[in-house]
Image: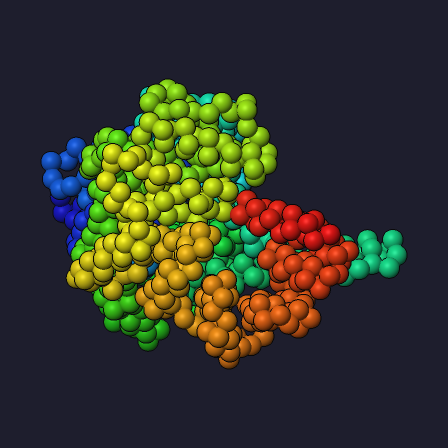
Amino acid sequence: MCSESPAYSKNIPIFCLLFLAWFIYLATISPTVFYRDTPEFTSTAFSLGISHPAGFPIYNLMAKAVTFFPMGAIPFKINLFSSLMACLTLGALYLVSVTFLRVLTGPEHSESHSWAALLPVGFMAFCMPFWGNTMLAEVYTLHTLFTVLVILGLLKWKELEDVRYLYAAALIYGLSAGNHGTVAFYLPAILILFFFWCRHNRWRHLSLCALFFVWGFSVYMYLPIRSLTEPTFDWGNPETLQGFLFQITDRKDSRTHFNILHQAPTSTVATSALVEIWESVTTWISNLSFNVRHVCTIFLKDVYHNLSLVSVIGFLAGAVICFRKNLPFFLFCAVMVGINVTFFTSWRGEAFLPSYIIVSMLTALAVYTLVFTRWWKPQSDNSESLETTLLHKPGPLGIRWGRMAFVIVALIIPWMMIDKNYSRVDHSWNHLSETLTRQVYLTLPDQAVFVSGLSWFFYNYNQDVRRLRDDVTAVTVWDLISPHRTGMLTSKRYPNLYLPEKDKHDFNSLQGISKYAQDFIESNSTKTPVVMEQNSTMYDQTDFTSRWKPYRNILLRYGSPPSSAPDRGSSHKDSWEEFKRLLETELSRPNSGRDLDWLNNPKAWIYSTRVYFHDTGRFELEREVLTTIGGFLGQKDNPQWMFQYLDSLIADRRLGQAQIMLERINEKAPESFEASLGSGLLQRAQGKFQAALDSFHKAETLNPGSFRVHLEIAKTLRDLKMNSASQAAFLKAQNHIFNIRELVSFRQESNGNERAR
C-alpha cells in the first residue's frame, strides 16, 4: 500500500484539473440547441438519423446512449455528451504525454514527466476551440479523443513492445473514421511509425491491423441500414451506392479543403522551350515555398492566439528535441500536423484540434527538458534524481529559476479560463437559437408542405425531438434545386406527395431544375398548402418568384389561397411587420446582445425578404427592409448596402433621393465597384447615356466577372443605337450568367434588344 502511494500522489494534480474542467464545462454548457450544426446533431443523435457527410455514425450511436439518462432535456443531455468526451480527452492526453516522455527519455523521473505533461493539458482544456465545443452538440471532442487514443495505442506498443496495443490502435482508428472522415489523412503518419518500429513479421502485423481497422470502419454500415428505414433526417440517401459514396467521401465541402494551395504567386511567361522548363521548375519551387511559409505562419499564429506563446515556443523547441531523440516520431508529428493544417487552413478553429494534440505533446517534452533536466550541464552531471533536486530540494540556481518559471507559466491556465475565454464560451443562459424558429413553425398552416431553407436543421429538431408539427411534411430547398439531392424525394419516403417524373426534366440546365421545382410545388399546392420560408437561394435558382405570396411573418404560400380559407397573409407589409414584432420579442430577452451568432437565421430571412421585394417590384418595402439591415445589422456604411438602396430608388424612379445616396457612396467608397456601377445606373436613368457607359466600363475593370455590369453595358449601347456593339455585349453578358435569376434578366433584355433591331 505504501509503495503505491507515490504513484497515486503524482496523479493528484491531473485529477484536480479534470475535476475543475468538468465543473467549468457544466457551468458553461448550453441548455438547449445551439447554432450551425447543433440542431442537426441533436436530431440525428436522438432519432438515429443520417447527419451531413460523412454521416458520423459512431457519434450518433454513442450520443444516443446519453439520451436515456433520467435527467434533463434531450438537447442538454447531448451537449453533456460533448463535455464528457472532452474530459476523457484531457485524461487521455495526459496519459499519452507521459507515455511519450517515457518513450523518449526513459521511465525514470516519472514525477517530472507528470508535471511536464500537466501544463499543456491545462492549455488545451481552456483554449477556445476545444472549450467552445464542450458545451454543444458537436463531433470535435469525440474526434479529439479518438485521435489521442490512436496515438496512445501506438506509443504503448512501442513502450511495452506488446503488439496488442498496435491492434487496439488500428481498431480505434477504424472507429474514429465513423466519427470524422479526415482521420484518413493520419494514415501516412501511422505508416511511418509502423515501418520504423515494426522489425519482425511486418506484413502479417499489417494485415491484422487492416482487419481490425475494417472491423472498426464497419460502423459505416449504419448509414445504408438506417437510411432504408427513411428517418426524417436522412442526408444524401446513403441506402443507394451513389448516396453512400457521396457521404463517406464528403464531396459537399471538397471545394473548401486545401484552399490555401490556390493562393500561390503566379508564374511568368516563358520565351523559349528551355526557359519555359526552367520557369516551370522555379515556379513550382517558389509556389511550394510560399505555401509552406504561409501555412506555417497561419498555424503558429493560431497556436499563439488559442493556446499561448509558451505553446508556440514549446512546439518548436519540442520538435527539435524530438528530432534529435526519435526521428520516426518526429516524422509522425510533422506529417500529422502538416496534412491537418494544410487541409483545414481555410477552416481553422476546432479543425486544428488534432494538431493541438501534437503541440501539447511536444510542449510537454520541451517543458520536461528545459525545466526538469540539467540540460545546460554534461550528461554525467545529470544523474541525480530530478524529483529530489527540483521538487523536494532548493537545488542550484538554475533549478530554482526553472521551478519559478514553471509556476509563472502555469498561471496562464486560470487567466485563459477566467479572463480570456469564460465569457465567450459561457452559453448557460442561451435559449435564443430555438425560440424564434419555434414561433415561426407554429404559424405554419395545417397539413402543409413546408419548403425549408437555412432553418431546416431547426425544423427537423422541432419535428423529431419536440414533436411540434407532426401534421407538416417538410422538404428542403436543396431537395428541389440540387440534381444529386432529388434521390431523396422518393414515394417511399413521401407517400403523400406528388413527385414529378425525373426523366421528364433536364437536370443539366438551370431551367430544367427550375421546372422540376415548380412542377413539384405546383402539383402539391392543388391538394394542400405549400409554404416556404424566405429563401434567396430559391429566388436565384428558379424563375417563379412572383408566384409566392405572403402568408405570415417570413412564410410565403405558393399561388393564391383557397377562397374558403381566411386570407391572413394578403398583405406584404403585414407579414413584414409581424416578423419584425417576432424579432423584437427575441431582442427583448435577457442577454440577447451577448452572442450574435443566433442572428444567422434572421439575417438570412431578412436578406431574402429584400430580394423578394425587389424582384416583385415592391421597392418601398424593399427599402424598409434595407433600413432594418442598415440599422439593426450595422450595414449603413457597407458599399453593397448603399448600392442596393440606390438601385431600389432608381428602379422606383426616385432620382433625387438616388442622387443623395450616390453622393454618400462616393464619399464612403469613392473608387469602389459599387460607386461606378451606381453612377452608371443613375446617369442612364437621367438620360446621360455616354457618361453612363463610361461609368459601366470603369466598373467592368474593377469586377470583370460581374454579370450585372456586362448586362448594363449592353443595355446602354442599345440606348445609344449601337446595335452591333450591343449585341456583342449581350453575348459577353451571357458568358457570365451564374443562376436562373440572371438568365431570366438576360432573356428579357436580349429580347428587347432583338425588338430594337
655 and 185: which one is in front? 655
522 and 697: which one is in front? 522
Is residue 708 visible to the viewer in this orientation of the structure? yes
Q: For the view shown, which residue lies furthest in the bottom direction? A: 667
Is residue 371 visible to the viewer in this orientation of the structure? no
Residue sitting at x 23%, y 31%: 470
Q: Is residue 260 left or right of residue 104?
A: right
Residue sitting at x 40%, y 60%: 622
Q: Is residue 248 left or right of residue 554?
A: right
Q: Does residue 349 sit above or below 476 in this rendering?
A: below
Residue sitting at x 18%, y 56%: 429
Render colour scheme: rainbow
Q: Does residue 50 sit above or below 413 in this rendering?
A: above
Residue 548: percent from left, percent from top: 39, 43
Residue sitting at x 83%, y 58%: 270
Q: Quadrant of residue 318?
A: bottom left
Numbered-mark total = 0
493 and 642: which one is in front? 642
Q: Does residue 586 sit above or below 63 in this rendering?
A: below
Residue 688: percent from left, percent from top: 64, 72
Residue 264: percent from left, percent from top: 64, 59
Q: Is residue 225 left or right of residue 615?
A: left
61 and 629: which one is in front? 629
Q: Does residue 496 sit above or below 307 in this rendering?
A: above
Residue 445: percent from left, percent from top: 25, 37
Q: Quadrant of the N terminus?
A: top left
Q: Is residue 457 left or right of residue 352?
A: left
